[in-house]
Image: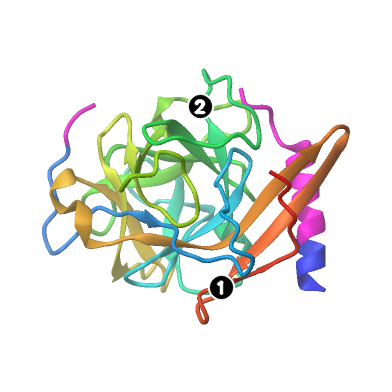
Amino acid sequence: MALSFFALAMVMWLALGSDYGSTPVSAASEGVQASDLVFDVVSPTGEIFWITYGSVIKLMHEKTKFRLHSHDVPYGSGSGQQSVTGFPDIDDSNSYWIVRPTLDSSAKQRETIKSGTLIRLQHMITRKWLHSHLHASPISGNLEVSCFGRDGESDTGDYWRLEIEGSGKTWRQDQRVRLRHVDTGGYLHSHPKKYTRIAGGQQEVCGVGRSALTMCGWQPRVCIFPLLKANEISLCFIVFHNSPPLVSSNCHLGM
């Protein structure tokens, strides 16, 4: 029942959503590392699930098991923009992100994404963009990662370069990738140090340098793929389970 209500909400979000339209950073101290996004899940039917423009994803930090998260709470320092954190709970609507192309891209919803492509991640609830800049992050002093702008309000501070590891050149759920911020050169990262005030119990998300790229990663735990037909929007709802490493799905991709 909960999934049905959520799928209905996703249809509304996608139907009403907007159209698509560097300085090196040194590595931080105290074990702070750059991050990967790891997609390593097997479908029960053996299908390969491509991550496409319009996909709604939830990303889990591999080392700490916290989800990439944002909420309508500003930082008390730095930019004062909407904070981005790692969140411990599985069931939280503030941990969903929509994969979008950049403003100057001609890409359409449901198109696949190649390594080296610049993308944006839009926070589903607040409609703001995953963003970074040269402000210091509150806990570690690395690059602050925030959410900024809204539908129709975006700039290059929202651009992240997709870097796929291995032989594959197109983003799919079983590939290891990194997100590198275009303006600062920092890689998306999280670590176990927790906030005590703005988001008690949640951990810092920040940008860090290239020297520690191989030390941590992210994994998807939910993906909602838009399935588009003429005059119709439907959804493919994928839940990635911790154990066994399979998915629950109501999908027929038809690709």
Q: Position of residue 130 (x, y in %)?
A: 46, 42
Question: In this rendering, is residue 197 above or below 25?
Answer: below
Which residue is label 1 attached to? 246
Label 1, residues with CA under 10 Å away: few <14, some 14-19, many ≥20: some
Quarter holding the N terminus is bottom right
Amino acid type, residue under disc 2 in the picture: Thr
Which residue is label 2 attached to? 102
List the single residue furthest toward the front. 46
Along the line of sight, which residue is nearer the eye, 143 or 232? 232
Queried whether the magenta region covers residue 23, the answer comes back as: yes
Dot placed on the residue nearer the N-terminal end, 1 or 2: 2
Label 2, residues with CA under 10 Å away: few <14, some 14-19, many ≥20: many
* Number of numbered discs: 2
Quarter of the image for residue 182 reads top left
Q: Position of residue 51 (x, y in %)?
A: 55, 46
Quarter holding the C terminus is top right
Which residue lies at the image location 77% right of the left edge and 72% below the top edge? 2
Queried whether the magenta region covers residue 14, the answer comes back as: yes
The boundaries of the magenta stretch are: 7-24
Q: Position of residue 176 (x, y in %)?
A: 36, 53
- Circle 1 or circle 2, nearest the eye: 1
Cα separation, mark 1 vs mark 2, equals: 32 Å
Which residue lies at the image location 27% right of the left edge and 62% below the top edge? 216
Which residue lies at the image location 39% right of the left edge and 44% below the top edge? 168
Lateral position of residue 50 relative to residue 8, left or right: left
Whether residue 234 is visible: yes
Lateral position of residue 143 relative to residue 172, left or right: left
Q: Secondary structure at mark 1?
A: loop
Lateral position of residue 168 relative to residue 33, left or right: right
Amino acid type, residue under disc 1 in the picture: Leu
Q: Which mark is residue 16?
A: none
